[in-house]
Image (spheres, rainbow, N blue to C red):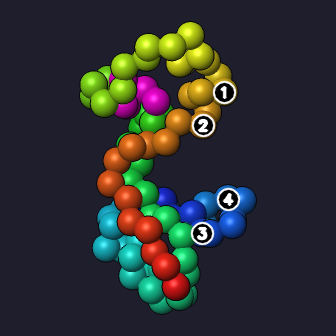
Amino acid sequence: MWIFHGDAARFASGVFASREEGLAWVAKHGLTGVLSEYPLGEGCYDAAVAQGRFQPSRPHHGTPSHVAGFSPGLDHVHIAG
């Protein structure tokens, strides 16, 4: 799934089934921000570890604050207005 987070926004403002749907919505509203791909059905940290994209190597890896702030690390698009 794809999530749009506008520049300086506190919360995400759109969730889409495809990159194309997200880009069309962003263009329709003339937005700036980042459209990012997220795994569906699991957290970003768990998906990255399971897929071998991240290996915990420091004591803070896997702690609540680390997991809560973990980026998806998948495809993304920066959109400038």
Asked if the residues shown at circle 2 and circle 3 are in contact, with their CB atoms under 8 angstroms apart, the answer is no
Q: Secondary structure at mark 4?
A: loop
Q: How many marks?
A: 4
- Residue 75 position, x and y percent, is 32, 54
- Magenta-highlighted stretch: main secondary structure? helix
Counting residues from the N terminus, which is met first, the one under dot 4 or under dot 1? 4
Residue type pointed to by label 4 = Phe
> Residue at left 38%, top 54%?
37
The residue that disc 1 covers is 65
Task: Specify few, some or many for label 3: CA neighbours under 10 Å numbering under 14, 14-19, or 20 or more.
Answer: some
Residue type pointed to by label 2 = Gly
- Residue 35 position, x and y percent, is 45, 64
Residue type pointed to by label 3 = Gly
Q: Secondary structure at mark 2?
A: loop
Q: Secondary structure at mark 3?
A: strand
Asked if the residues shown at circle 2 and circle 1 are in contact, with their CB atoms under 8 angstroms apart, the answer is yes
Q: Secondary structure at mark 1?
A: helix
The residue that disc 4 covers is 11
Left or right of 41 in this view: 60: right
In the figure, 24 relative to 16: above or below?
below
> Residue at left 61%, top 60%?
12
The residue that disc 2 covers is 69
Report how far apart the C-alphas of labels 2 and 3 lie in the structure: 17 Å
Mark 4 vs mark 1: in front: 1
Q: Which residues are magenta?
A: 45-49
Residue type pointed to by label 1 = Ser
Q: Is residue 2 magenta?
A: no
Q: Quadrant of residue 23?
A: bottom left
Report how far apart the C-alphas of labels 4 and 3 lie in the structure: 8 Å
